[in-house]
Every structure is written in C-alpha cells, then in structure tokens.
Amino acid sequence: MTLVDNRRARLSRYAPWIARDYFTNQGPATIIVLLLVGFLAMQGAGGPSQFAALPEIIQARAIQGLVGALGFLGTFFATNGIIANDRKFGYYKFLFSKPLSPLAYYALIFALYGLGLLIVTVVLLGIWSLAAWPMFPPELLFVVAVTYLAYGGIGFLLSAAWRFDWISLVTVLLVANVAWSMWGASEGLVYWALHLLPPVHRADELQAIILRAPLDVPWALVAWIGGYGLAAFVLGLLVLRRRSLASS
C-alpha cells in the first residue's frame, strides 16, 4: 500500500469521530437554540393551535424566518474554532504526529459538519411537523446547504487565518450588511468594490426559495452566494497550507 493510500485509510478512520464530535456538541446546541427560537415564535403567534389556524402563506413566511436563524446559527456553531481551536490548544501536535494532510483533515471536518447540519435540519423539521405544521420542503435543505457553504466558507477562512474567528465572522457579516445597505445603490468603483464583501444583503432572497415553485430558483443568486463561500473555503485551504499550525 502506498503512502497516499495509507493517509486516505487513516483519514477515513477519523470520520466517525468527527461525526461523533458534531452530534455531541454543535448539533445539540443548534437544536436547542432553534427550538427556543421556534418556541418564542410560536408563542408570539398565540401558541401551536393559533399558528396552525393562520393562512399557509403566513406559516411559510414564519418558516422562512426560522431558516435564516438556522442557517446562520447552525453554521456559526459548526465552524467556530474549526481550525483555530486546534492551533490555540495545541491539539494539532497529536492530530498530525502521524502522516496526515491537515488540508484533507479540515476539509473532511467542514464537509461532515455540513452534512451534520442537514441532518439536524431534518430533525428540526420532524419536531416542527409534530408540534406545529406538517411540512418537508426539499428546498429548505437546499437553502441550508447553500447558506452553510456561504457563511461556513468565510468562517473556515477566518479560522485558518487566526484565533479570533468567531468574532471576526460576525464582524465581517455585520460590516458587509451595513456596507451593502449604505452603498448598494452606488455606481462605478464603489459598487464593484462592494463585491469584495459577502452578499449578505441577498440572504432573504435565498431563504425565499422555500416559497417559490420548484423550478423557480434564482440560480444566479445561488451561484453568487455559494460561489463566494466556496472561494473563501478554497482560500482558507491555501492559508492553511502556507501558515504553520504552530503559529499563534
């Protein structure tokens, strides 16, 4: 067996432990927080029985709001410290004491945590269906996946760059939202410079996909939001390759 095959075999043995970490930490945290958000939203509508009596379009818009919270919070929990914690606490010394590619390892974590978030979404849909309104729109999983790639890619890059990834992620998204709000209608160089920032001002349109007909998907918007996150993720891998994990 070649060295590459050995590394792939070793990497595959990490997968169950990575999944276990997500479903014992980030996954339950996401479920608990979203259940609390959903409970408060339900109480605001007068309780489950009152919510069930609302017009379907209002119910769907309530779901749209919850999807926004799920996409952001689920991604935030999943990518917080995804690389930075190993650097900060010195775990990388044990993880990579044997031949194992840091790029492949952290890319695997990113992928498995994204899959875990989709499973958490299905669980929350099941709870929502029992407590409030039976529904299972496949578009919702698509929106959560694109949101994870968009926000998670940025979080991955920041976590590869330095140790204060969570606060910098919130700061980047906040600054981008303010900048697009203030100068989104500008022309010329200012407008194009805004495209260096994540298109968080279009997040509502992405979440609105769950209200659209199955074939009415704004693919250009999906490509912009998802493509930005994918580019950030790839850049994060490049930073990880060039910057030593031993650096603070």
Image (tube, helix red, strand yellow):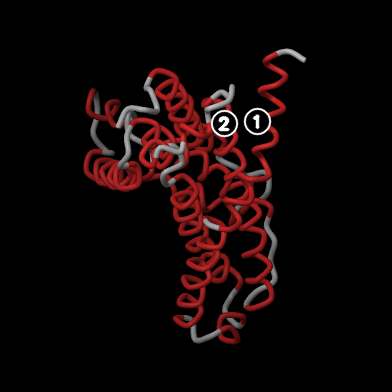
Question: Where is residue 214 shown, x and y percent of the image?
Answer: 68, 48
Residue nearest the viewer, comparing 5 with 33: 5
Q: Name the residue: 48% across, 49% down.
A: 75
Nearer-the-camera pick, 15 or 120: 15
Furthest residue toward right? 1
Is mark 2 in CB contact (under 8 Å) with mark 1?
Answer: yes
Determine the residue positioned at 60% across, 34% down: 108
Looking at this rendering, what residue extends furthest in the top direction? 2
Q: Quadrant of residue 155?
A: top left
From the viewer's side, name the closer residue of 156 and 21.
Answer: 21
Tell me the amino acid under the disc marked 2.
Tyr
User: Residue 105 shows which numbered tag?
Assistant: 2
- Tell me if mark 2 has few (under 14), some (14-19) or many (20+) residues whose alpha carbon lies within 10 angstroms of its own: some
Whether residue 154 is situated above or below residue 138 in the rendered picture: above
Q: Secondary structure at mark 2?
A: helix
Q: Amino acid at mark 1?
A: Leu
Q: CA distance from mark 2 to mark 1?
A: 7 Å
Q: Quadrant of the N terminus?
A: top right
Report crowding for label 1: few under 14, some 14 to 19, many 20 or more residues within 10 A (C-alpha): some
* Residue in the image at 61% along x and 54% along y: 140
In the image: residue 185, left or right of residue 155: left
Horizontal and vertical percent position of residue 114: 58, 44
Q: Which numbered marker is on residue 11?
A: 1
Which of the 4 quarters of the picture holds residue 2? Answer: top right
**Circle 1 — which element?**
helix
| Position above or below: 240 against 92 | above
Q: Locate residue 229 relative to residue 60 in the image: left or right.
A: left
